[in-house]
């Protein structure tokens, strides 16, 4: 019974998370069709700070823009920041982890040293340091977050390489005369895709939260771009008089990140039961 | 054990050196901005004044020289001079460190005090309403944007119910501390609950638990003597590692609640391009994090009798 309940719970995570994520992706893809108004141009000061109504489901902001439309378009920014920066993280992490694990020696020492240093710098602090160098802006957020969160991927890739390197099929490939690059790409990489995919899913969720934090501090997408974190930052002043301006973008971040986290958890339980404690 | 602690402290030196180098390069590759800002934001600054200021802050030297000077000062415990306020960074940071530590420690106490028991009892009653509820809470806790949670808490407890002050430091009293500490602690608490639950579930399948039960120990004693202790060993590592994330998040929480700590100083210094202050704040945050991890390692000795420090 217990086992059955647990199995059911695993599936619930995956299904619920997948459904939420799919919903957000659809929202981002079809934003122009779904949004009742234009997120930037349809500003009408006559209807500024209107509470939610039949005309404006989520109310309007201080410039009279429809919050529902801005939230719908905001999904494009959050998702693209999450996906692009996590792709960058995954590439860096996998590349460093693969080569460190495979070549060993001084390269391994160097990469692991760097990884350990990255692990001892809080992600938000490192992202802030890069933003301090590059200055505010959405493009810079992509770069900052893409350089911030690769260390877990790198560590896991490396340890997986070390454990697969001495497997018979890798030895066989070497005996067949495969080159190093070919062995890494065709023999080792396919066997470690599971954990990397899990890390990437959770990483997208984390990147979306970090983007929101940077935007909240005023370092992210600049107005009038409809980004969820940025909307929250500008709405802070009116939070006590017009809370709906802040509630809906915050809710959007919350639901998106929760969907991705649930999906990542579900994936991990299926693909990779052993590392379920590496990073919860 | 003292020798072990000292050796670990010595091992910090290369880590700190590497971190300071990375941060120094990141923050200093852009040359002139800082002096222009320090000149008071005026567009036209007399080149002579600029040159004098560059000399004053040592910015006329090449980057590697500046790093060596920075290191020399750092070895003496001197974090440098603020571009903007012409005060010692030590003083600026020193004034802010206590509020941040207070906030972080209270947040950690809340997180540990609620997160570990929640995870523990959820695991003992898998599939119960408590389990379902707390694990849903735990996923929500790691997914909720912190500043949004903070805003909601402010709205309910300060604006609607008038129970607590909305923001500010007051004179550092408890009522001012509660909302920011909860905001900061929630994601940490959620993480600890999840880790604890996973650890307990795993430990319950271990052979020594079966042995303990087989020799007739009551379930209560099994849980208290065997499960709890082994759980804490597993959870402590996560607790230590994730404390870094907590220190990072103080930036957001302090900014939101106008809390006069290191985090808000860091954000302000980034906007003012006051690089020595930015550098100092980052270094202090990382050092605190490293020290916490050292204490975690030392704590193992009390919890896990198998570990001996030589």
Image (spheres, rainbow, N blue to C red):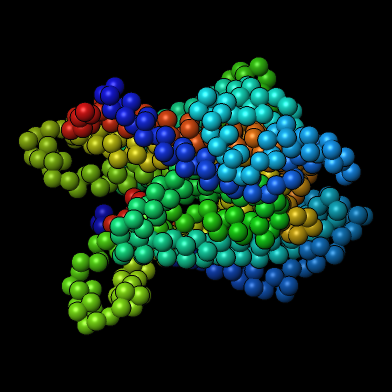
Furthest-right residue in view?
A: A46
**Position above or below: A267 against B49:** below
Q: Is residue B183 visible?
A: no
For residue A77, side relative to residue B73 (left or right)? right
Residue A33, image x, y percentages:
72, 74
Furthest-left residue in view?
A: B215
Q: Nearer the viewer, residue A133 or B51?
A: B51
Residue A78, image x, y percentages:
63, 60
Residue A161, image x, y percentages:
30, 64
Residue B266, image x, y percentages:
64, 36
The C terminus of chain B - image quarter: top left
For residue B29, side relative to residue A108 (left or right)? right
The N terminus of chain B - image quarter: top left
Q: Nearer the viewer, residue B61 or B2?
A: B61
Residue at image location 12% in from the left, 37% down from the top: B212
Residue at image location 70% in from the left, 47% down from the top: B31
């Amino acid at each position: 019974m217990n086992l059955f309940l647990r199995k059911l719970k695993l599936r619930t995570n995956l299904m619920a998370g997948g459904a939420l994520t799919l919903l957000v992706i659809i929202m981002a893809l079809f934003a122009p069709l779904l949004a009742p108004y234009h997120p930037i141009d349809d500003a009408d000061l006559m209807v500024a700070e209107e509470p939610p109504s039949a005309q404006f489901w989520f109310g309007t902001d201080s410039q009279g823009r429809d919050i529902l439309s801005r939230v719908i378009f905001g999904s494009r920014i959050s998702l693209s920041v999450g996906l692009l920066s996590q792709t960058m993280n995954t590439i860096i992490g996998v590349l460093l982890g693969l080569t460190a694990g495979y070549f060993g020696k001084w390269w391994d020492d160097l990469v692991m040293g760097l990884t350990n240093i990255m692990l001892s710098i809080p992600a938000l602090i490192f992202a802030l340091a890069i933003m301090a160098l590059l200055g505010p802006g959405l493009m810079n957020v992509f770069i900052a977050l893409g350089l911030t969160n690769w260390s877990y991927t790198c560590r896991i890739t490396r340890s997986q390489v070390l454990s697969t390197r001495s497997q018979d099929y890798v030895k066989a490939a070497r005996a067949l005369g495969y080159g190093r690059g070919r062995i890494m790409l065709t023999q080792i990489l396919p066997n470690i895709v599971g954990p990397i995919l899990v890390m990437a899913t959770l990483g997208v969720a984390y990147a979306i939260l970090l983007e929101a934090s940077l935007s909240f501090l005023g370092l992210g997408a600049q107005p009038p771009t409809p980004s969820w974190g940025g909307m929250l930052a500008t709405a802070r002043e009116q939070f006590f008089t017009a809370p709906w301006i802040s509630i809906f973008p915050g809710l959007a971040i919350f639901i998106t990140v929760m969907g991705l986290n649930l999906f990542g958890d579900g994936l991990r339980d299926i693909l990779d039961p052993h590392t379920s404690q590496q990073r919860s | 054990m003292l020798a072990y602690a000292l050796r670990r402290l010595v091992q910090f030196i290369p880590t700190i050196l590497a971190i300071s180098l990375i941060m120094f390069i990141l923050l200093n590759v852009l040359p002139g901005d800082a002096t222009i800002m320090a000149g008071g934001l005026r567009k036209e600054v007399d080149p002579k004044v600029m040159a004098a200021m560059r000399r004053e802050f040592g910015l006329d030297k090449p980057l590697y020289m500046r790093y060596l000077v920075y290191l020399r000062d750092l070895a003496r415990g001197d974090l440098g001079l603020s571009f903007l306020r012409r005060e010692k960074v030590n003083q600026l940071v020193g004034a802010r460190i206590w509020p941040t530590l207070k906030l972080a420690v209270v947040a950690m106490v809340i997180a540990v005090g609620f997160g570990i028991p929640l995870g523990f009892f959820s695991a003992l009653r898998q599939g119960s309403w408590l389990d379902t509820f707390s694990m849903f809470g735990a996923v929500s806790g790691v997914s909720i944007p912190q500043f949004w949670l903070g805003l909601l808490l402010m709205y309910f407890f300060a604006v609607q119910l008038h129970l607590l002050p909305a923001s500010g430091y007051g004179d550092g009293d408890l009522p001012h501390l509660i909302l920011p500490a909860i905001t900061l602690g929630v994601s940490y608490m959620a993480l600890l609950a999840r880790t604890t639950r996973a650890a307990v579930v795993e430990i319950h399948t271990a052979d020594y638990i079966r042995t303990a039960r087989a020799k007739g120990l009551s379930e209560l004693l099994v849980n208290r003597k065997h499960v709890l202790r082994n759980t804490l060993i597993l959870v402590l590592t996560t607790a230590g590692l994730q404390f870094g994330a907590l220190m990072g998040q103080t930036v957001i929480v302090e900014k939101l609640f106008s809390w006069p700590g290191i985090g808000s100083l860091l954000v302000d210094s980034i906007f003012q391009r006051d690089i020595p202050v930015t550098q100092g704040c980052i270094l202090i945050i990382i050092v605190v994090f490293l020290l916490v991890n050292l204490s975690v390692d030392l704590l193992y000795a009390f919890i896990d009798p198998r570990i001996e420090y030589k």
